[in-house]
Amino acid sequence: MLKFLLIFIIPLITACSSGGYNSQINPNIDYKIPTSYRVYQNNYFQVNLPSNWIVTSMEGPDKPTHITMTNVYDETIVTISVVNYFRSMDETCRLSTSNLVDNQNNITKGPVIEKGTCKIKAYENGKEHGMLLRVYPDQSFYSIHYEGDPVKVFTDIIHNTKGKDDKMQSLLKSI
C-alpha cells in the first residue's frame, strides 16, 4: 500500500510544483491562470503581479516603456507607460479625454486635474474606462490606463506597483 501511495503522490507533487511563467506571450495559445506570482520592472516602475493576471504586452526597460496586464477572469486591462512627449499637461489631458472612448457622452468624470494628475473616467460597452496621467517639464509622459473593474485595478495592480523614480511615485501617490 505504501508503495502504491508513493507511486501516485510523487508524480502529483512534481507536476504541481514544476510550473513557471513564460513572459513571451504567444497569441495562438489560450492562456489560463499563471502558475506563480511575478515581478516585472523597468527603469521607472516595478509591478508585483498577482497570479490571476497575465502580461499581454511589454516594452522597455528604457523610454518608451510600458506593460499591459490582463485579468484572466474578467479581462480587466491595465497599461502603465512612460514615454517622451511634447504637449502641455492641459492639452494632453484634453486630447486623452477625446481618445479614451468613442462616444464623448460616455465620459463620467473629467478631464480634471487633481493633485497634479489628470483624471478621466468613462463608461462604454459595459466597461469602466479610466486614465490617470502626468506630463513633466522634461517632456516625459507617465500614464495608467484601464478598462474594466476599477476595484481590481487598484487593489491588484496599483497597490502592487512602486515607482522607481520620483515621477512615477508621484503619479501613484496622487491616486
Image: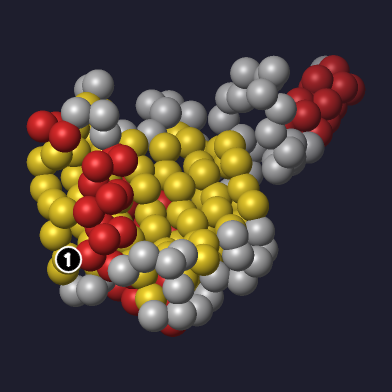
Q: Is residue 109 left or right of 62 when viewed as pictured?
A: left
Q: Quadrant of the N terminus?
A: top right
In front of the other: 49 or 131 = 131
Residue wearing tag 1? 113
Place of residue 107 in the rendered image (x, y in percent of width and height, measured from the top left): 14, 39
Q: Is residue 29 left or right of 44 when viewed as pictured?
A: right
User: Which residue appears at 46% of the width and 70% of the height?
Assistant: 140
User: Which residue appears at 29% of the width and 40% of the height?
Assistant: 100
SS label for mark 1: strand
Which amino acid type is shown beneath numbered disc 1?
Answer: Ile
Q: Is residue 37 left or right of 170 when viewed as pictured?
A: right
Density class for disc 1 (Cα within 10 Å; few <14, some 14-19, many ≥20) is: some
Place of residue 55 in the rendered image (x, y in percent of width and height, measured from the top left): 58, 41
* Quadrant of the rendered image containing residue 7: top right
User: Which residue appears at 81% of the width and 20% of the height?
Assistant: 8
In front of the other: 97 or 66 = 97
Place of residue 75 in the rendered image (x, y in percent of width and height, measured from the top left): 42, 28
